[in-house]
Structures are given as structure tokens and as C-alpha cells.
Image (cartoon, rainbow, N blue to C red):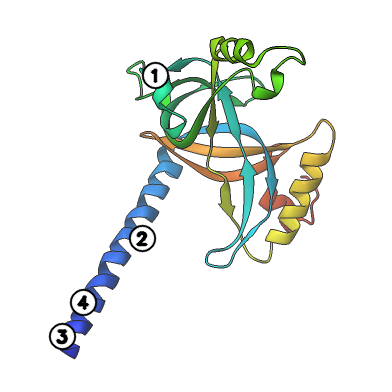
Amino acid sequence: MMSNTKKAILAVAALAVQSVCIGWLIWRYEQIVRHGTEVRFRCEAYDPYDPLRGRYLRTTVRESCTNILINNTKAYARFRLYAKLEPGTNGLWRVTTVADKPQQDGGLWVKRDRTTLNHLLSWSAQGKDEPYEAFRKRREASPLVATVPMPDQLFVNERLAPKAEEVLREATSAKGKGAVAVYRVKDGEIVITDIEIGGTSVIERAMKGGEAK
């Protein structure tokens, strides 16, 4: 049987390894935030609760792209791909290319899990009197569209979370308004750093009772 001393040593070693891993994740996150390129995407948001990690604001950012550089698209459905990000309009960014691996073109590339590939024509586009086989061929001839999800969880202070969630709901439901997810990108990694409404951090608005600057 294992002695109490050995058990204690193993427990301490396990805690040390865990601490190193957590420290590495924090250090990597800080490096991306400090030195990464800032990008913004329009988003929707709501406020779920994680009993293990606390309150967070959750965004929904899924960018679509038809410029897909993949060797064998038939072999893929839901998997990791690399997305190229480029500036769009109004300070927002867009996904312009999706590929198996980042291209050596000097662009801003990020790796994304859970990317999906689907034909532009959905099954619901079948004509009322269109034979199934004819529609299947028409659908498969349509371009493939990649849907690229972005990081979606921004953890916030427990006290501010309810008000921040209220501010987000009002912004995303109001006509002509909306929220913007702010990210930092470095070495193929992307992290979320803030959510803004009208250029103002949702946290700042929550602290001021929902009013803009």
C-alpha cells in the first residue's frame, strides 16, 4: 500500500502541475491582450451562469465565408480550421478566407474549432415540385459556406453582471443598435477582452447604471 508520505508528495506534485498550467494560461492570455491586434465583430449577447466559474456575458459571433481553401472538403463537416481576418467597414472586421492551415501571406490568421461547412443552398430550398435527386445535385453544385465561431465568454464581476446583461439586451433588441465584441489576436490565438455598445464598454455602462458616457 502507498504510504501517507507518498500520497502527500503526489498530492503536492499534482497541485504544483495544476498551478503551473493555470499560470501558463494566464500568462498566455495576458500576452495576447497586451501585444495582440485588436479586432471587432458585431455580436448578440446574453448572460448565462456557470456555477464553477461565475457570471459571464456570452456573445454570439459567427462569421460566414465562401472563400474556402481546403484540399478535401468532402472529408470535413465540423472541425478546426484557420480563418483570415481583415478590416471591413465601420471599424468592424470580417472573415475573408478559411483554410486547412494559415497561408504565408502576411495576413491575420486565427485557428478556430467547431467551424462548420455547409452548402449555400439548404435542404429547405427544395422546390415544391422539384424531384429530390435534381435538388440534391443542384444543392451540391452550390458553393460551400464556412461558418466560423469566435470566443463567446466574457467573465465579469458578479455584482455588475445582472446590470451588464440588461444593458446588452436593450442594445441588441433596439433597432439600429447593437453590441460589438472586442478581441485581441496574436500568434493564431484570439481572446475576447470586452463588449462595447456605441464605443463604450458594457462594464462601464453597467457601473453607471446603463447610461452612456
Residue 147 drawn at (x, y percent): 55, 28
Give how far apart the Cα atoms at labels 2 and 3 are.
Answer: 28 Å
Residue, x 43% and y 25% (percent of image)? 108
Quadrant in which residue 59 is drawn: top right
For disc 4, the neighbor class at 10 Å (few under 14, some 14 to 19, many from 20) is: few
**Residue at coordinates 79% horizontally, 57% vertically from top-left?**
209
Task: Give the mark toward the camera: 3 or 4.
Answer: 3
What residue is drawn where x is 71% and y is 12%? 130
Amino acid type at mark 4? Leu
Q: Which residue is mark 4?
A: 10
Q: Secondary structure at mark 4?
A: helix
Q: Which residue is mark 2?
A: 22
Callout 1–callout 2 Cβ contact below 8 Å: no
Up/down of 68 relative to 39, above or below: above
Of badges 1 and 2, the one in the foreground is 1
Look at the image and tell me whether residue 43 can be seen. yes
The amino acid sitting under disc 3 is Met
Which residue position holds label 1? 70
Cα distance, mark 1 to mark 2? 34 Å
Which residue carries the number 3 mark? 2
The image shows residue 53 at horizontal and vertical percentages of 53, 64
Rendered-image quadrant of the N terminus? bottom left
Of the residues under marks 1 and 3, which one precedes in the sequence? 3
Q: Of marks 1 and 2, which one's residue comes earlier in the chain?
A: 2
Tag 1: amino acid: Ile
First-in-chain label (2 vs 4): 4
The residue furthest bottom is: 4
Check whether the beta carbons of the residues at disc 3 and disc 4 lie within 8 A of each other: no
C-alpha gap between disc 1 and disc 3: 53 Å
